Amino acid sequence: MKKLGIVVISIVLLLLTGCGRQSSPEQVQGLGKAEAAAIAQAAVKKFFQAEVDIEDREVTLEDPDSLIDSDTHQPIYRGVPVHAVLKRKPQDGEIAAFHAVIDPKTKQILSLSIDRMNKQTTQTTSLSTEELERIAADYVRSRALLSPQAVKLVKCSPVSTGDRKQYFYFTDDQYTVAVGVDTESRQIVTFTFD
């Protein structure tokens, strides 16, 4: 569960420092940049029903062996992180960036998130944690992230004031997934398998 926080912080730091300006390897652990971008692009379509073009994005890969947890001395990521950030200013409602962590051997998505540009709204009605949990649980079941009949809530985080997300952690007693719901748009914007 701590891993999701580390992943989110890493992504935010990369965006703040300008991951497009850093040199990116063409291949990491046998996974090429073009292949990783295509896998992530297909996952965004499958899991978020959004078409994203990778031609107008700066695509970068990270070597997970270079991102080590100071407590465990193990890589933070179990797969290869790939980031695709628009090279231009995004339009309202457009996906400005998407990020994935991909297992280089199986080519499976371990984590996926989108950064959608939304107008700042002053919504008068906010959803309760229970309603957001229902949205997250429905997403986990409908996308078959876990065995749909066995999905159970493990815990939820408080709403993060900095990024308008609330995270819900689910298990089917075999796997665990963390799902982030944007509290303003009421949409799922990230998931990570633990």
Image (spheres, rainbow, N blue to C red):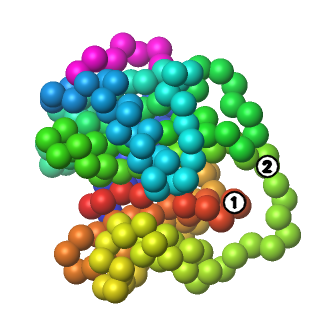
- The residue shown at (22%, 29%) is 31
From the top left corner, tell me how far across and down residue 40 is, in percent: 39, 40
Residue 186 shown in magenta: no
Of residues 39 and 111, the one drawn nearer to the viewer in this rendering: 39
Q: Which residue is mark 1?
A: 185
Q: Position of residue 11 (x, y in %)?
A: 44, 39
Left/right of residue 91 with respect to residue 183 in the rendered view? right
Q: Secondary structure at mark 2?
A: loop
Query: What is the crowding at mark 2: few (fewer than 14 residues within 10 Å), some, or many (at least 20)?
Result: few
State the CA–CA distance, disc 2 to disc 1. 10 Å
Q: Nearer the viewer, mark 2 or mark 1?
A: 1
**Which quadrant of the figure has residue 143?**
bottom left
Of 190 and 143, nearer the camera is 143
Could you say which disc has been placed on residue 120 in the image? 2
Q: Residue 150's image quarter?
A: bottom left
Front-lying residue, 25 or 48: 48
Say if residue 169 shows up in the picture: no
In the rendered view, would you say 57 is above or below 75?
above
The secondary structure type at the circle numbered 1 is loop
Given the image, on which type of amino acid does mark 1 rest? Ser
* Residue bounds of the magenta highlight: 16-27
Relative image position of residue 149 (x, y in whole percent): 34, 86
Residue sitting at x 43%, y 24%: 59
At 57% from the left and 47% from the top, the residue drawn is 50
Tell me the amino acid under the disc marked 2.
Answer: Gln
Q: Is residue 60 visible?
A: yes
Q: Quadrant of the N terminus?
A: bottom left
Q: Are marks 2 and 1 in contact (CB under 8 Å)?
A: no
- Give me the disc on residue 14: none
Q: Earlier in the sequence, mark 2 or mark 1?
A: 2
Nearer to us in this view, 106 or 66:
106
